């Protein structure tokens, strides 16, 4: 396993992290046995960053992690989130954030949390974020309830502005550094170099688009991006190369990203993804795939409140 410093935090994290949205059945129903085996293989192979949220499976992901991490809690850097509880349920008030942390600790069956992040900041008015949520997060860190704090979201300009303005430790964004989109390099990675903020890259498979199975129904990408994804899947099947592996090789090749979180639903997906770490990126195949993607490369879609894009 390769580890990288997570910005100025005390953590060294594995370049591949375990994204636990899958444990909340966000990508289809997963049995306890499958989920537990996938997580345990990942940890046994050196993956030490585990990311979840009360939102994933409406607390199922956290509850499962609490069970699966029995005896292994000390082996992982455990990150959860706060503020988002359902598709349309957000509560960024200071009181709810404090209570949410206690609920997460209980479900995760632990008495300490390594990382607490505001989940999907673009969905709440900026005043609430700046007057309630961020100050509360700073207090929780100061009081020692969590070691590090962060913000997560999709629209990069908004995320980057806030990451530059406040003394937070981590910024996490998704679908912004992979074969289809590399906008993370525009401002967030340069900011990280200047400030020491740790950058976590989520959804290197573009939330399922870059997999043979394709994206879940709830995926919000426009039709031409989905169609381009299907063409890439087909191309990789024709040439006999695992598209998820190619996508991960690509994501892992950016050294300024501390860790890339991928959702995994089986031991075979964990094993396949781990091979990406020490297999050289096939340049010819990458060039051919990039050519298919070119018409939609770096296209994002609107997410959250219109004033927070
Ligand atoms: P992803 O791009 O990692 O895709 C996950 C899908 O790919 C799942 O269906 C999974 O089973 C499949 N997959 C993984 N490896 C595979 C393989 N080798 N072969 C075939 N299929 C494979 O998307 P994601 O799970 O949404 O993102 C990863 C993690 O990032 C999440 O679990 C979550 O922890 C984090 N995340 C955070 C935010 C946020 O905080 N706002 C948003 C998105 C993701």
Image (tube, rainbow, N blue to C red):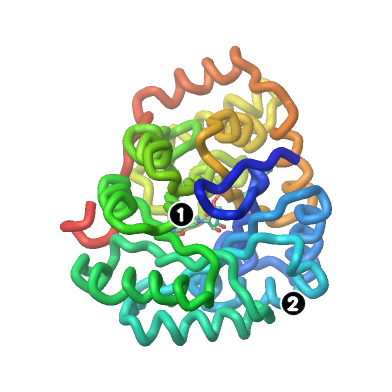
Report which residue position mark 1 lands on.
170
Secondary structure, mark 2, is: helix
Furthest residue toward left: 307
Asked whether the residues under the numbered discs 1 and 2 touch, taking CB atoms below 8 Å apart as contact, a structural biologist would say: no
Residue plotted at (60% across, 15% down): 283
Name the residue that disc number 2 marks.
67
List the single residue furthest toward the top: 284
Crowd around label 1: few <14 · some 14–19 · many ≥20 (10 Å): many
Quarter of the N terminus within the rendering: top right
Residue appearing at x 70%, y 41% in the figure: 273
Q: Position of residue 299 (x, y in %)?
A: 32, 36
Disc 2 under 8 Å from ligand 1? The reply is no
Q: Is residue 66 above or below residue 255?
A: below
Mark 1 Cβ inside 8 Å of ligand 1:
no
At x 56%, y 78%, the residue is: 59
**Residue at point 41%, 65% (across, down):** 119
């Amino acid at each position: 396993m390769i580890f990288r410093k997570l910005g100025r935090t005390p953590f060294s994290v594995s370049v591949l992290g375990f994204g636990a949205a899958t444990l909340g059945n966000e990508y289809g129903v997963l049995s306890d046995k499958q989920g537990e085996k996938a997580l345990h293989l990942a940890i046994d192979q050196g993956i030490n960053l585990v990311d979840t949220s009360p939102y994933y499976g409406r607390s199922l992901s956290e509850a499962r992690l609490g069970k699966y991490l029995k005896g292994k809690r000390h082996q992982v850097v455990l990150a959860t989130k706060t503020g988002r509880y359902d598709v349309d349920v957000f509560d960024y008030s200071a009181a709810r954030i404090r209570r949410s942390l206690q609920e997460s600790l209980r479900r995760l069956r632990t008495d300490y949390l390594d990382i607490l992040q505001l989940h999907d900041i673009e969905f709440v008015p900026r005043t609430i974020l700046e007057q309630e949520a961020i100050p509360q997060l700073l207090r929780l860190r100061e009081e020692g309830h969590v070691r590090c704090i962060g913000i997560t979201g999709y629209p990069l300009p908004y995320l980057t502005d806030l990451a530059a303005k406040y003394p937070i430790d981590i910024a996490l964004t998704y679908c912004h550094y992979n074969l289809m989109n590399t906008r993370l390099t525009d401002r967030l990675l340069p900011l990280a170099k200047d400030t020491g903020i740790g950058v976590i890259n989520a959804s290197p498979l573009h939330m399922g688009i870059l997999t043979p199975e394709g994206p879940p129904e709830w995926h919000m990408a426009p039709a031409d991006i989905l169609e381009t994804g299907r063409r890439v899947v087909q191309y990789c099947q024709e040439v006999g190369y695992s598209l998820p592996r190619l996508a991960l090789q690509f994501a892992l090749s950016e050294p300024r990203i501390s860790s890339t979180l991928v959702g995994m639903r089986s031991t075979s997906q964990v094993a396949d993804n781990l091979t990406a770490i020490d297999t050289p990126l096939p340049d010819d195949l990458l060039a051919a795939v990039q050519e298919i993607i070119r018409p939609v490369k770096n296209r994002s879609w609107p997410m959250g409140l219109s004033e927070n894009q």
